[in-house]
């Protein structure tokens, strides 16, 4: 899509980046290249670098180009790699960029699976992690040690929607890198915001990770992940480990995620519109003790979120005060399906303490504000009146 010299807009990029028509038939959609290997042109001459599908597959490559264009855009010529899950993406990232003796700072409120990977798996390999409040960039300086090599940030966080100032964190990492004489990379888990609302690489961060399982695929029918790097040398390291460790995204899932991304702007606008209505409605409801949504002006991260994001999306958490209230409520929802995960067109509702964050120790959970009464809703793109009626009906049982 290079008809004019002006860089294409975001929606055009979603639909066209990496999605060239297939050269033999002209198929407008990149085919699912369901093949493990590729016949060579002649001895020592693979066709266009295609040799074996763990290393390179045309369907996955099309998605990787699309992801790189979305997160980097015209400003940052990023590289992207797609993996079998968000956790496979994070595993590959860590295997590529940290080693024994390194220290990593992590948002204290990160996704439960990220915490489990870091604390229960990677600690065994001599990497140390400190869980810190990344919403306060200044205070973070005291947590940096001479061994710090990475700052792993989630914003908004799951499930309490804490907001970290990415520009401030990138600036802090830069000055601290100079002070300790070693590069501290800033990695952002951009799963909740998606590049439609927030582009960390354009704010000075180094790497973005995604669970494509959520909004990027958007239809709750694929598990996948991605790593997108601003620095081509980091991208090459990720690519090397992707091939060496092999946690690749399959051709069929690559096709699904590419297809999902084509409607990302229309879906995210709808999630955002419904999210704002539902958050406002919950905040005014007598049975709801507290609402966590960055779009509410009462939210402590609202000003930063409004500055670095172009929308607030459809993720909302709220507190019903007790596990008994949660049980009565969750047994009654119908439109909002009770289940883990998020980011699909359908509304999904969950209880973080017993579901997504069950892998976090109880004391650690409370420290993160994940109370027994906390409910998380991924507001879908159904008619908002139906979502509100469902919540009202279930709240009546509380
Ligand atoms: C789901 C999720 C992950 C993990 O991704 P999987 O695809 O489930 O492996 C990581 N980070 C965040 C914020 C998530 O929501």
Image: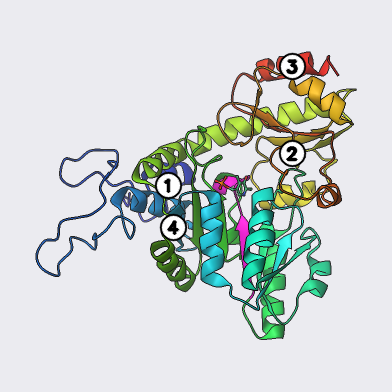
Query: Disc 4 to disc 1, how far (Cα)?
Result: 17 Å
In the image, residue 143 lies at what x, y percent? Answer: 79, 72
Query: Disc 4 to disc 2, how far (Cα)?
Result: 29 Å
- Count neighbours of disc 4 (C-alpha within 10 A) and say few if under 14, some if 14 to 19, many if 20 or more: many
In the image, residue 135 lies at what x, y percent? Answer: 79, 58
The quadrant in which the C terminus is found is top right
Q: Could you tell me which secondary element the residue under label 3 belongs to?
A: loop
Q: Could you tell me which secondary element the residue under label 1 belongs to?
A: helix
Note whether residue 75 is visible: no
Rendered view: 11 above or below 384? below
Q: Earlier in the sequence, mark 4 or mark 1?
A: 1
Q: Earlier in the sequence, mark 2 or mark 1?
A: 1
Comparing marks 2 and 1, which lies closer to the viewer? 2
Q: Which residues are magenta?
A: 184-195
Q: Earlier in the sequence, mark 3 or mark 1?
A: 1
Query: Disc 2 to disc 3, how far (Cα)?
Result: 18 Å
Rendered view: 345 above or below 32? above
Comparing marks 3 and 1, which lies closer to the viewer? 3
- Count neighbours of disc 1 (C-alpha within 10 A) and say few if under 14, some if 14 to 19, many if 20 or more: many
**Mark 4 lies on residue:** 81
How many numbered callouts?
4
**Mark 2 lies on residue:** 352
Which of these two is toward me, 24 or 110?
Answer: 110
In the image, residue 221 lies at what x, y percent? Answer: 48, 33
Checking the image for residue 332, the label placed there is 3
In the image, residue 341 lies at what x, y percent? Answer: 61, 37
Q: Earlier in the sequence, mark 3 or mark 4?
A: 4
Q: Earlier in the sequence, mark 2 or mark 3?
A: 3
Q: Could you tell me which secondary element the residue under label 2 belongs to?
A: loop
Comparing marks 3 and 4, which lies closer to the viewer? 3
In the image, farthest residue toward the front: 124
């Amino acid at each position: 899509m290079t008809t004019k010299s002006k860089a294409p807009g975001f929606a055009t990029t979603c639909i066209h980046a990496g999605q060239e028509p297939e050269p033999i038939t002209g198929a407008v959609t990149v085919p699912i290249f369901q093949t493990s290997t590729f016949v060579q042109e002649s001895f020592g001459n693979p066709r266009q670098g295609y040799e074996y599908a763990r290393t390179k597959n045309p369907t996955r490559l099309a998605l990787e180009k699309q992801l790189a264009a979305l997160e980097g855009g015209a400003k940052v010529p990023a590289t992207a790699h797609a993996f079998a899950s968000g956790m496979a993406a994070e595993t590959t990232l860590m295997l590529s960029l940290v080693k024994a003796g390194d220290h990593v700072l992590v948002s204290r409120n990160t996704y439960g699976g990220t915490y489990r990977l870091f604390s229960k798996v990677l600690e065994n390999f001599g990497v140390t992690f400190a869980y810190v409040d990344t919403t306060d960039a200044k205070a973070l300086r005291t947590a940096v040690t001479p061994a710090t090599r990475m700052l792993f940030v989630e914003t908004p966080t799951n499930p309490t929607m804490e907001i970290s100032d990415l520009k401030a964190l990138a600036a802090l990492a830069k000055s601290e890198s100079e002070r300790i004489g070693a590069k501290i990379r800033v990695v952002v888990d951009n799963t909740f915001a998606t590049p439609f609302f927030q582009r960390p690489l354009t704010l000075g961060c180094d790497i973005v990770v995604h669970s494509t399982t959520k909004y990027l695929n958007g239809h709750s029918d694929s598990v996948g992940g991605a790593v997108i790097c601003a620095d081509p040398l980091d991208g090459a390291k990720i690519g090397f480990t992707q091939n060496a460790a092999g946690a690749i995204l399959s051709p069929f899932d690559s096709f699904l995620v590419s297809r999902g991304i084509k409607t990302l702007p229309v879906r995210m606008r709808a999630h955002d519109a419904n999210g704002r209505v539902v958050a406002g409605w919950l905040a005014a409801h007598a049975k709801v003790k507290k609402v966590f949504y960055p779009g509410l002006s009462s939210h402590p991260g609202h000003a930063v979120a409004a500055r670095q994001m172009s929308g607030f999306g459809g993720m909302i958490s709220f507190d019903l005060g007790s596990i008994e209230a949660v049980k009565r409520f969750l047994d009654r929802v119908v439109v909002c399906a009770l289940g883990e995960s998020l980011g699909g067109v359908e509304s999904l509702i969950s209880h973080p303490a017993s579901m997504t964050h069950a892998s976090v120790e109880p004391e650690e959970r409370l420290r993160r504000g994940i109370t027994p009464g906390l409910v998380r809703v991924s507001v879908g793109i159904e008619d908002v009146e139906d979502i509100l009626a469902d919540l009202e009906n279930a709240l009546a049982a509380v």
